[in-house]
Amino acid sequence: MSREYVEPPGMQGSPAAHRALVFAALDLGTTIDAVGQAAAALIGVNQTDLICLNALYRQGPMSAGQLAAVIGLTSGATTTAVDRLERAGYVRRKSDPADRRRVLVDASEEGARQAFALFDGLLDAVARFAAGYTEEQLALLMDLLGGFDAIIAGYAGTLRERAATGEGRQQA
């Protein structure tokens, strides 16, 4: 049995192609999440841990508080994720050379390479697919994806703020 989703006012009356694009973007997010969950399971961590590892590998060493801000978790949840990643050998804690009282979390070069190698086949397939588009088409797609990313990241922040204040807690 299928149920009809009642669209918010901003989408009602939009052209069918616009609505289809919005839902295709949301479906893509779900599919990307599934890939992240499967990859994380293969290396013995969870998806949140993999997101932490990705942030550390791409942005470099940072404190647990900085990492929490980057990925949008509480400091407690971030510390738990870092503990799991450290036990599994994917990160290490080290003293900050600028302030020995401060501890930084750093991705293990070998561990991160091993974890992210799981995505090589996906990245190759996406690169082959993208090769069929012109530079102009790719620029348009990058603009579209960048806009989606900004909107979605902003909305995630809004939801986190609401959750932190207890606003809008609903039960089904």
Image (cartoon, rainbow, N blue to C red):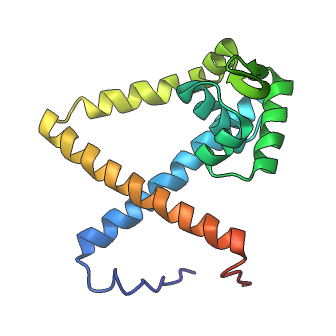
**Residue positioned most to the top:** 110
Left or right, residue 33 beside residue 111: left
x then y, percent, for residue 41: 74, 36
Instruction: Report the number of discs.
Output: 0
x then y, percent, for residue 20: 32, 67
Residue 44 seen anywhere in this rendered image of the structure = yes
At horizontal 66% and vertical 39% (from top left) the residue drawn is: 67
x then y, percent, for residue 29: 50, 53
At horizontal 42% and vertical 83% (from top left) the residue drawn is: 7
Q: Please identify the quarter of the rendering in which residue 147 is found.
A: bottom left
Left or right, residue 73 beside residue 80: left
Q: Please identify the quarter of the rendering in which residue 116 is found.
A: top right
For residue 26, above or below residue 165: above
For residue 146, above or below residue 22: above
Q: Between 124 and 75, which is closer to the camera in this rendering? A: 75
At horizontal 73% and vertical 77% (from top left) the residue drawn is: 166
For residue 69, above or below residue 23: above
Residue 134 seen anywhere in this rendered image of the structure = no
Q: Between 28 and 11, which is closer to the camera in this rendering? A: 11
Q: Please identify the quarter of the rendering in which residue 156 is found.
A: bottom right
x then y, percent, for residue 84: 83, 34
Q: Between 86 and 161, which is closer to the camera in this rendering? A: 161
